[in-house]
Amino acid sequence: MKKALCLICVCMAFFTGCGSLPYDMAYDTGSKISSFNVVSGQDRNVAKTFASGLCVVTEDVTDDENVDMEHVAAAVLFDLNSREVLYSKSAHEILHPASLTKVMTALVALQHGSLDQQLTATPTVNITEAGAQLCGLKSGDSMTLDQALRILLVYSANDVAMLIAENIGGTVENFVEMMNREARRLGATNTHFANPHGLTEEEHYTTAYDLYLILNEAVKYETFNEIIQMSSYQTTYFDKNGKEKTFDKTTTNLFVRGDYQPPANVNVIGGKTGTTKAAGHCLMLFSRDSGGAPYISVILGSEGTETLYREMTDLLDEINK
């Protein structure tokens, strides 16, 4: 009888975790709010909160009297030091990102490549979509990763995105999977990339909040911060015969270019622009106030260039409130 009782106790301990406290999960890993991440490890009972050092949005936070966001799909403004949500509209709505995608492309390339690495173009750089922004790469052209990243972020060249992806990832498809893995690592669980440039595809989407997570990681890299501040970029690369080809373009960011001015006491460091028919006009920025405190702002789905920059100016003005 004693042996039978002991056996019953052992079985109960095995199946019920006898002697251990229950671990209740305060969140659902399938939630549409991507503000956490469950960290797997040897001890599966341990859940490490992902958002402890991040801004977290669960509902809209708006200032309708002073910020006109009527003509945008989504907008956010975050104080990175205090982790305060200064403004949020539809932060978790799934939308097309257009060329804001290229921030993730640059981030993955910086993580896995070296700036002096030579990249050589193949026919995959041949993008034929009407209106797509291109550097004009041809098969056999070559440049360093450093050059490619500057053309990517300053001029938003889609063919250069393909050049980076194929050379860093081995194939474009593998690089895109690297982008998706990085998105999951960052907790950007409402994001899925289908390409490295942001031209419209059905399974290529993100949210304003997820873009904040991605830019928040990218600005940790000195090279990224340097590039997004550039008002123009000039360089020389080579074709398949070793002949020089010249690149000389200004930035697509009209704040950095000086065409639009941010509010007083706000310094726009840089960011990324994006425009497609499906995505509308998009912009995300890394900025600092007069005391040097950092902020990230994102607008998706604005109806035009002038509207976009007016709305972003209104949004940045919340920093001064």
Image: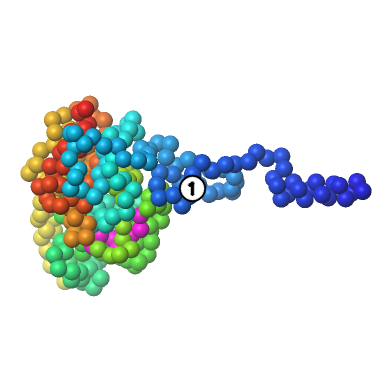
Q: Residue at x 65, y 38 (%)?
A: 21
Q: Residues within 10 Å of mark 1 (few under 14, many from 20)?
A: few
Q: Which residue occupies the foreground of this view, 87 or 55? A: 87
Position of the C terminus by quadrant? top left
- Is 304 positioned to the left or the right of 56 in the image? left
Rendering coords of residue 93 (x, y %): 32, 51
- Residue 226 visible to the viewer: no
- Amino acid type at circle 1 is Asp
- Is 107 positioned to the left or the right of 237 in the image? right
Q: Is mark 1 on a helix, strand or loop?
A: loop
Find out whether residue 193 is within the magenta segment: yes
Q: Which residue is drawn at 12% across and 52% down?
A: 304
Q: Which residue occupies the foreground of this view, 55 or 271? A: 55
In terms of secondary structure, what is the magenta stretch mainly?
loop
Q: Which residue occupies the foreground of this view, 117 or 206? A: 206
Which segment is the magenta one? 191-199
- Is 37 positioned to the left or the right of 170 in the image? right
Q: Looking at the picture, does residue 201 appear above or below residue 260?
A: below
The residue pinned by badge 1 equals 28
Scheme of image coloration: rainbow
How many callouts does the rendering have? 1
**Outermost residue to the right:** 1
Find out whether residue 163 is within the magenta segment: no
The image quadrant that residue 173 belongs to is bottom left
Rendering coords of residue 301 (x, y %): 21, 52
Rendering coords of residue 71 (x, y %): 18, 48
Q: Residue at x 30, y 46 (%)?
A: 90
Q: Residue at x 38, y 61 (%)?
A: 177
